[in-house]
Amino acid sequence: FRRWPKRWRQRLTPANLLTICIFILALNLAIFLLYLPYNFYRGFMVAHQFGLSTQTVIGWFSDWSKSVLIELLIAIGTWTTLYGFMKLLPRRWPLPVGVLMVTFLFIFTLLTPTLITPLFYKVSPLENGDLRTRIITLTQRAGMTADEVYTIDASSKTTEVNAYVTAFGKQQRIVLFDTLIDSYSPDEVEVVLAHELGHWYYHHVLLSLLGIGAVGWLGLFGLRWLLDRLWPWLGLRSPSDIAGLPFVLVLVYLASTLSLPVENSFSRFGEHQADVFALTVSQKPEVFILLFEQIAEQNLSIVDPPAWEKFIFYTHPSIAERIHFAEQFQTN
């Protein structure tokens, strides 16, 4: 044990860390710039063409710059941690990296509503009134004790509507897009919020984080197995050679793409659970049906996509399926 600090200093020097950080920064910055034209076309030009965006060019680039900065910091922290432990613990690195990865996921999710969201939106408490009273009553009926209700100025960027609930221990808050409040009736707002409360009730965020952590941990052991066998073929000096990062990124992309149907199947199941909860708690299936008809029209959604497309790409049940289920609920 007494030899470990000296051995670690030999394996991971400040020069090693600096090299890793510079390489990660340069590679990720190049990727962001490469995708910039596509992201601008899809996120700004197409969105404006179909009336889904209210953002200015300056506003879009401001948000893009902030997103890039956040993602660069995360990338540097993630990959520096990975390659640092690969050098320190050539055989055991998946264990500490996995622990740190899961810990970071929980902390980032916990801090996002209070630290990240305000960087992109103006967050304000919802004024006292009938809507706030109805929301508090609904949350109590669902079993939540949240009394923090906020609205964000989504209308400064988009015409789309949304709401979400964040709840970790005693930190419970409800956030509504101002587009939802301005465009829909209080009954419809209640149904949207009841759906989000369903995610809280069934612990979907927690289960998702645990699932990501478990799969990611298995992926780390798989990565070690591959690098131990392929590093000479890749022309690397060792499995922990930072020059292998592009290969690792390709593996991550391939694994993410291949696992998409499975991930989305779990996501659709969770969304259906939240729909059932919303209908049960609100007891307003007719409002649910009208709401999704309006959302489909406003968001230019494909109401009934092909089965293969839904299986691979859709994180939510189709609009047609959700309306059909609400009609069955109403009949029963």
Image (cartoon, rainbow, N blue to C red):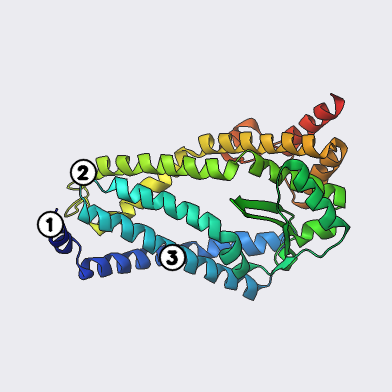
Q: Are marks 1 and 2 in contact (CB under 8 Å)?
A: no
The span from disc 3 to disc 1 (Cα, nearest Å) is 36 Å
Identify the residue shown where x is 18% and y is 52%. 238
Measured from the top left, where is residue 246 in percent x and y? 33, 55
Measured from the top left, where is residue 173 in percent x and y? 67, 56
Give the amino acid type for the residue marked by disc 3 in the picture. Answer: Leu
Identify the residue shown where x is 36% and y is 63%. 27
- Quadrant of image for the C terminus: top right
Q: Secondary structure at mark 2?
A: helix
Q: Secondary structure at mark 1?
A: loop
Is label 1 or label 2 in front?
A: 1
Is label 3 or label 1 in front?
A: 1
Can residue 302 be seen from the camera position used here? no
Q: Using residue 309 as the reference point, say whether residue 256 is left or right of it.
A: left
Is residue 157 depicted above or below 257 in this figure?
Answer: below
User: What crowding class fits label 3: few (fewer than 14 Cα within 10 Å), some (14-19), or many (20 or more)?
Assistant: some
Identify the residue shown where x is 65% and y is 64%. 45
Q: Earlier in the sequence, mark 3 or mark 1?
A: 1
Measured from the top left, where is residue 205 in percent x and y? 57, 45
Give the amino acid type for the residue marked by disc 1 in the picture. Answer: Arg
User: What crowding class fits label 2: few (fewer than 14 Cα within 10 Å), some (14-19), or many (20 or more)?
Assistant: some
Total numbered badges shown on the rendered structure: 3
Q: Secondary structure at mark 3?
A: helix
Q: Which residue is identified by label 2?
A: 228
Q: Earlier in the sequence, mark 2 or mark 3?
A: 3
Which of the numbered marks, if any, corresponds to residue 2? 1
Identify the residue shown where x is 81% and y is 48%. 137
Measured from the top left, where is residue 18 in percent x and y? 27, 70
Q: Earlier in the sequence, mark 1 or mark 2?
A: 1
Quadrant location of residue 293? top right
Can residue 149 be seen from the camera position used here? yes
Which of the numbered marks, if any, corresponds to residue 72? 3
